[in-house]
Amino acid sequence: MPWSDPLTEAERQFTICNACRYCEGHCAVFPAMELRRTFSKGDLGYLANLCHDCRACYHHCQYAPPHEFAVNLPRVLSQLRTDTYIECAWPRAFAQAFRENGVVTAMAVVFALVLFIMAAMFFVDGAVLYAAHTGEGAFYQVISHEVMVWTFGAAFGYALFAMAMGYLRFRRITGDRGGGLPSAARAGHDAARLTYLHGGGTGCTYPGEAPTPWRRWFHHMTAYGFLLCFAATSVATVYHYVFGWIAPYGWTSWPVILGTLGGIGLIVGPAGLLALHHQAMAAARKEPDDGPEDPDRMALDTGFAALLIATSATGLALLLLRETAAMGMLLVVHLGIVMALFVTLPYGKFVHGLYRFAALKRHAREQAAAQAPGMREE
Amino acid sequence: MSHPDLPQGPIDVLVAGGGNAGVSAAINAAEAGCRVVLVEAAPRHMRGGNTRHTRNLRVMHAAPKGVLTGAYPEDEYFEDLMRVTGGETDERLARLTIHDSEAAMDWLIAHGVGFQPALGGTLHLSHTNAFFLGGGKALTNALYRAAEAAGVTVLYDTSVNRIAIEEGRFTRARIVDAKTSTRIEARVLVAAAGGFEANIDWLKEYWGEAAENFRIRGTPFNTGGVLRALLNQGAQAVGDPKQCHAVAIDGRAPKFDGGIATRLDSVPFGIVVNKEGQRFYDEGEDFWPKRYAIWGRLVAAEPDQVAYSIIDAKAAEDFMPSMFEPVQADTIEGLAQRLGLDAGTLAETVAKYNAAVRPGTFDGQALDDCATEGLDPPKSHWARTIDEPPYSAYSLRPGITFTYLGVKVDEDARMIMADGAPAKNVFAAGEIMAGNVLGKGYLAGIGMTIGSVFGQIAGREAARYALE
């Protein structure tokens, strides 16, 4: 049951929280709230994206429903976050993708796979596609390096551009005036450590009432797994263009080591997050009105997590079977999944990182200003 | 029909009440090897009594300790207690509370409770009080998890409504929930069911019909049933039965359970009038944290137990924000109308006050030199003219935090009978015996310290008796 006007509801709840403040040790949202007495739409968009959804403030709230004050910040802020994703989507016509995230993700996967497999069958000789290839340039016997670079470069470039437009729009609608390098460094530190997905020190009250470290660890595995895979690709690019070393690379080469470690992270991390999500949703269905999560909300995280697992699983399979006749089809399937991942990046869960970073940066700047001598009254 | 969740077999320790004191006692007894049943009157989501609304523990410490800055030596702590109680304390029990407070904090940490530095707005407490990370409900959740891990059986929505004590020995009790009423026996009873502040009829015995207009800041479940049962069974009473801790809170607070968010800090920055539009006390006598408890009583003495704090635009941001919107108007007369007060009288009260304000330098953080001259009652500090619209008003009601009446205990938390002899197997902890230490007044965080120290002792001593 979503609130018909989450902005009004969030403002109502923050007005109660600002008179209580018991939760200020849990995360960044409450210290940011305390700098304000009123909450504009921009403020609420900022606070919603500063929230890491650890849910400590719900489980520790003396006013959580069924109390008549009905304070349930994780739930209303989650709704507001999705609303900001939709509002910041570029181009605007694609905003609908957030509302139908599961369908869009599934369709992207199916469409990309069909396209890639059909293209492979049409353009690649069957004798080549189903043969074992070894040695330098083995992959490029199936799909040429130029085709890969251009298609994936274009898709990734598009995703980056769309997300950059979203980032700028987010800053504009939340009234963020930007911040210097120190704020960005602080935000980077807080994002890298997930400082605020920790309940203030005891752990995250997710998927239930007892604090646990698991969500943070699984998120670390996912995020660092993603970065390691990205690093593997980057190193391989340098090998290719700078040193002229052509893939596939040996088992102990940097691209393979980084990619393997990242790939494992990208399976264990998202799988763990999905398992926790499953438990959280089971709990949410027991308390459909009063719980910290709306059981009917669209789940942005499941489609994205599944796609990451598929990307990694096909990548690792390709690595293991790269010297067999299965390589050709595995490569085509892996590339199809990666293409689906790239084109859906700006329209799914991935964008939370962008807006979270913008919010953390603003928070770092605000707190630095508030703690300057003479600024903080209390 | 007997209670469906009661475990089979004999019960060693029956704990009545599931706040900080009761759960702490249950944990200690269960960890010592006892079979413990804890009876909590509230449903699960409201468990924890007034602990749910607390936020800190006052802790003695010789050197910086965890989140606590500086030192808070025993003598300073004891002097603070003597000052607020005017000496109405049992010195042995007070010193025991102070002494054991440090170990009590360590015990809480060992049982999963997190602490954080003093909250913004309460930084003056950073060297005396350790704040619970996430507040009292976070502590409550952590302790219940520890209790379940230790094997305590918790019965929610269940209260103890009859207790039999024969010749100083507890023999049996009756526990009731919505459907069942069960007579149970246990080797030991730990009484930790709080005071009677949520029992309006009981409050009326001392306050008359005025009690109908009180707001009860904490749990609606502290109706004093266990306290009354113990007194009826011959326990020795302690603490003034007529007194309760009453602070001034926003009049729009719910009847029960409004907690901290309903507090209102605007009083020192404007004037306060009763429903007749007249001032009745010096609003600027001292800092609000030192005065809000006096104002509960003051408002209770005014007609219909209501008053209005009135400020102008200058003061709108001088205090911690309220959860309630003020009533606003561009003229004093308009404000009076909205409040249902006589416009002429209120305008005259404000005009008289404004005329008496003498120039000074306003400083909300200090006892400044802004005062009135020739006004009765005076306003000693923070007196500025009320002349800048929009004008804002917040209504005030007495908010009852807790009552002082309790049962007398000794250093083992053992309940003392009216004849002065200790009961053999009845222990008391928390608000139900806090009057032993805090006979009057209030010291931030001491209620939780008493609950923790005596709850932990009661559990330990209950186990010692039960397992003998």
Image (tube, coloured by chain):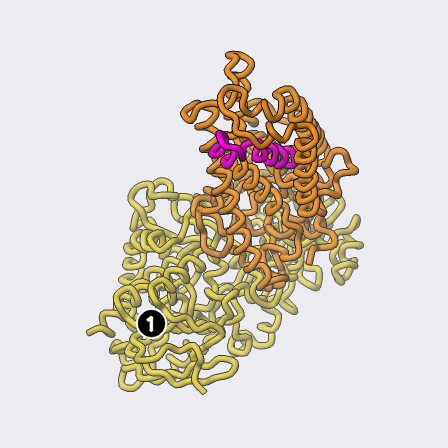
Chain colours: A orange, B yellow
Which residue appears at 65% of the width and 69% of the height? B304
Q: Is residue B42 left or right of residue A362?
A: left
**Residue A230 part of the magenta-drawn span:** no
Image quadrant of residue B422? bottom left
Residue stretch in magenta: A316-341
Output the chain of dot 1.
B
Label 1 amino acid?
Val
Residue A21: x and y, percent? 54, 49
Residue A378: x and y, percent? 53, 40
Which residue appears at 49% of the width and 74% of the height? B157
Frontmost residue, A198 versus A275:
A275
Q: Is residue B240 left or right of residue B426?
A: right
Frontmost residue, B431 versus B140:
B140
| A170 up-or-down from A30: above or below | above
| A176 up-or-down from A101: above or below | above
- Badge 1, how many Cα within 10 Å: few under 14, some, many 20+? many
Residue B354: x and y, percent? 70, 46
Which residue appears at 33% of the width and 77% of the height? B236
The residue that label 1 is drawn on is B36
Q: Is residue B307 visible?
A: yes
| B31 up-or-down from B187: above or below | above
At numbered mark 1, what does the secondary structure look like: helix, strand or loop?
Answer: strand
Q: Is residue B368 visible?
A: no
